[in-house]
Amino acid sequence: MEQSIRTQPPGPRPRPPAGGGAGEAAVPGPSAPRDAAGATAGAGGGPPGARPGRLRPASGGAGAARLRWKLRLPLGRTGQQARSGRPARLTAIGTGVLTLAGTVAAAGVDQLLFGGLGVLFGLGFVAVCFQAAVRVRSADLLAAPISGPISFALALLLLGPVTSPGVIGQVLALATGLALRAGWLFAGTGLAALIVAARFVAQRRIRRNR
């Protein structure tokens, strides 16, 4: 032992090559193929020859199922579901504009087709009052029954028959038109009032239940 130490040259001892230990450790033993096959099967979830890049991990849970269902839905059905919500609500100003425009339009069509304001004008006014009462928002419910009579009177002033010129003639024509068409006026205004009252009662019940 002492002789071998003395015969070594002075200086740092040479280190063994880095690949030597790895090469020796990489020598497969009798159980190496079985261990390698088990590691491959555990990592890829398939046979040893399968490529790991093509294997997809199994995804489970409600979140993954919803994501796959949303991806399968076509764009057309998604747009239809988004458009099938509640109708757009109108403010007080929007309700007044809708009622006035619809009433004047009905009066104009009746004047062009039949030469006067008759049944078509009355039916159009009732339909407009119904739409205004349904589409007005909850904070402006009173706008629907109020805007109806105003729009009716303005339509008579614009397109109603005038017997004599001047302001007095227009006032008399307006009074005559309101008297002759009072049934349509009360029908549209009453329908709007009933719908607004029903909506108000329903909202109060919903708030109480909450």
Image (spheres, grey):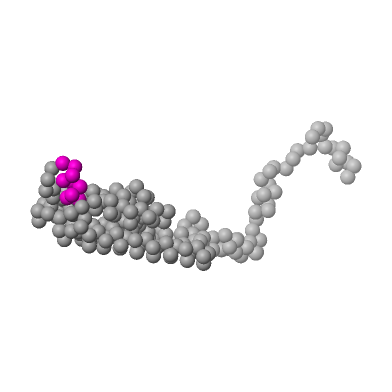
Residue 157 visible within the image: no
Q: Residue furthest top?
A: 11
Q: In the image, what residue occupies the spot 65% across and 54% down? A: 26
Q: Residue furthest right?
A: 2
Where in the figure is residue 138, as x and y percent of width and height?
41, 56
Residue 31 visible within the image: yes
Where in the figure is residue 152, as x and y percent of width and height?
24, 53
Q: In the image, what residue occupies the spot 30% across and 63% down? A: 191
Quadrant hosting residue 113:
bottom left
Quadrant hosting residue 168:
top left
Where in the figure is residue 83, as x and y percent of width and height?
34, 57
Q: What is the magenta range?
A: 166-174
Q: In what quadrant of the picture does the N terminus appear? A: top right
Residue 168 lies within the magenta run:
yes
Q: In the image, what residue occupies the spot 50% across and 63% down? A: 207
Going by the image, does 153 lie left or right of 82?
left
Going by the image, does 128 lie left or right of 74?
left
Between 178 and 190, the one nearer to me in the picture: 178
Q: In the image, what residue occupies the spot 64% across and 58% down? A: 28
Going by the image, does 198 lie left or right of 128?
right
Where in the figure is residue 4, as x and y percent of width and height?
85, 41
Tag count: 0
Between 160 and 68, the one nearer to me in the picture: 160
Above or below 103: residue 12: above
Between 65 and 166, the one nearer to me in the picture: 166
Residue 44 lies within the magenta run:
no
What secondary structure do most residues of the magenta stretch adopt? helix
